[in-house]
Image (cartoon, helix red, strand yellow):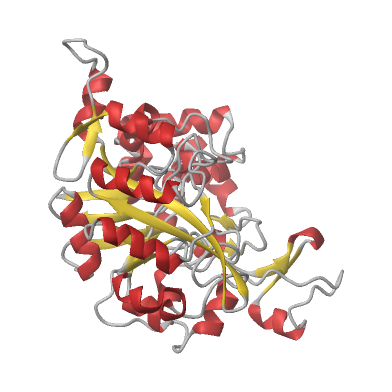
Amino acid sequence: MRFIADFHIHSKYSRATSKDMDIENLAKWAVIKGIKVLGTGDFTHPEWFKGLKEKFAPAEPGLFKLRPAGTKPLLTSEERVLNEKTRFLLTSEISCIYSKAGRVRKIHILIFAPDFETVENINAQLGRLGNLKSDGRPILGLDAKELVKIVLGISEDCLIVPGHLMTPWFSLFGSKSGFNSLEECFEEYSKYIYAGETGLSADPEMLWRMSDGRRITLISNSDAHSLAKLGREANVFDAELSYFAIVEAIKTKNPKKFLWTIEFFPEEGKYHYDGHRACGLRTSPEESRRYNNICPNCGKPLTIGVLNRVDELSDKEPGFKPEGTIPFKSLIPLKEIIAEILGQGVGTKQVEIEYQNLIKKIGSEFDALLNASLKDLKIVTRSEIAEGIIRVREGKVTVEPGYDGVFGKIRLFPQGEQKTLSKQSTLF
C-alpha cells in the first residue's frame, strides 16, 4: 500500500503551538493534506497521553485510529472519513540539554513507540528525571546516549531518531551545540541509530556529503506547530500499513518499501545560510569565512547555518550521490504557491478560498502538488496557479536563502512573467 507519513508534530501542549492542534483536528487535516499516517507527537505529556488513550482505538499493528464519537450508533460522514482514513503512530520529541566534553549540548531526539504500554514505561522512567508536564517537548538534563539506553531498555521495537540533524541550536550536528559524528554523541549506542531527520534547512543531497549522512536512513517530517504546516516535509512508503513494517523499511533503507521523502527547498529553511538577523546580514559560507564568522556591522558572532556546517563535516563534494539512497522531491506548500500568485499573505481570506477550492476539486494537497496534471489543474484553478504547481514539481524556482531564524523566500515566476500569464488567463 502506498501512503504518506509525517511522524514529527507537536500537540497543543507544546510551547509556541496552536491550540487547534488537538486529536480531532489532526485527523481532519491529515485527510486534507493527503497524509495517511501521522505521528501523535508529545506522548510524554500527561494530559496529551491521557487524551490519546481515551480517543484512540487499535487499528493495524502498532497504529491507531479515532474511536467513534461518544456512544452514537451512527457516525457522520466526516467522522467516518476520519476513522477510516487517518492512522496515528505514537511519537514524541525530547530536548536533551547537558554538558559533555567541556561543552553544553542541546540535542532533540524523536522516539517512535509501538504501543501504549511501552509509552507508559518510557514516561514513568523519564518522569523521574524531569518535569514532563512543563512542555509537550520536555527538557531533560539527560545525555542523548542515556536516553537511547533507557528507551531501548524498555522496548527494542522503539525507534530513536535525532531530529532536524543540522539546525544550529538544537540538533546532533548543530554548529552551536552539537557533535561532529554519531559516535561522538551516542558512543557505543550509535549502532542503534538507524535514521536521522533532515530538517527544513537541509535535504538529503546535502547530508549525503557526510559519512554519517550516508550511513543512516534520512527521513523528513513537518515538525508542525500548526495544522496548516502538517506535511510540509513527509515520507512516502509502499509497504504494509503497520508500525513494524514502517520501522523495518526505515531501518533497512529499503527503496522498494521506503520510496522517497518530501522536502522543503532547503534554502527556504530559516537556518540555511549564515548571518545575523539583528543587522539584516545574510552570508554564504565563503563570505562568512572572509568575515572570520563575525558580523562586519556590529562585531557579534554570525549564526553559522546548515550549509556551512555541512561543508565543515563533509568528505564529499556537492552533488555527490551514493548508491542505495532513498531519493527525494522538493516541494512548496500549496498555500505558499497560491499566496505568491495572488500577491496575498498566506493567511488571507483569498488564499484560503482558493486553497479550499483546490482541495475540494482535486482531493488533497498532495494530490494537487504531486499527481494532478497541468490540464486538470487548469480546469479547477487559475492558469497561473496551475503553472506554479508544475514549476515547483519540476524544480523551476528561484530562491533567497533563509538565515539566522529568517525563513528564505521562493519565487515561482521572474518579474513580469506572472502578469503575462494573468492576462492570458483573463482573456480565456
> Quick check: can you spot residue 216?
yes
Would you say 427 lies left or right of 247 here? right
The residue lying at 38 percent from left, 50 percent from top is 125
The residue lying at 51 percent from left, 61 percent from top is 397
Q: Is residue 113 or residue 248 the one in the foreground?
A: 113
Percent position (x, y) of residue 25?
A: 39, 29
The residue lying at 65 percent from left, 63 percent from top is 403
Q: Is residue 14 or residue 410 the one in the foreground?
A: 14
> Quick check: can you spot residue 372?
no
Residue sticking out furthest to the right: 298
Percent position (x, y) of residue 85?
A: 22, 34
Residue sticking out furthest to the front: 128
Would you say 344 lies left or right of 337 here? right
The residue lying at 55 percent from left, 59 percent from top is 269
Percent position (x, y) of residue 149?
A: 34, 65
Quadrant of the frame with the C terminus: top left
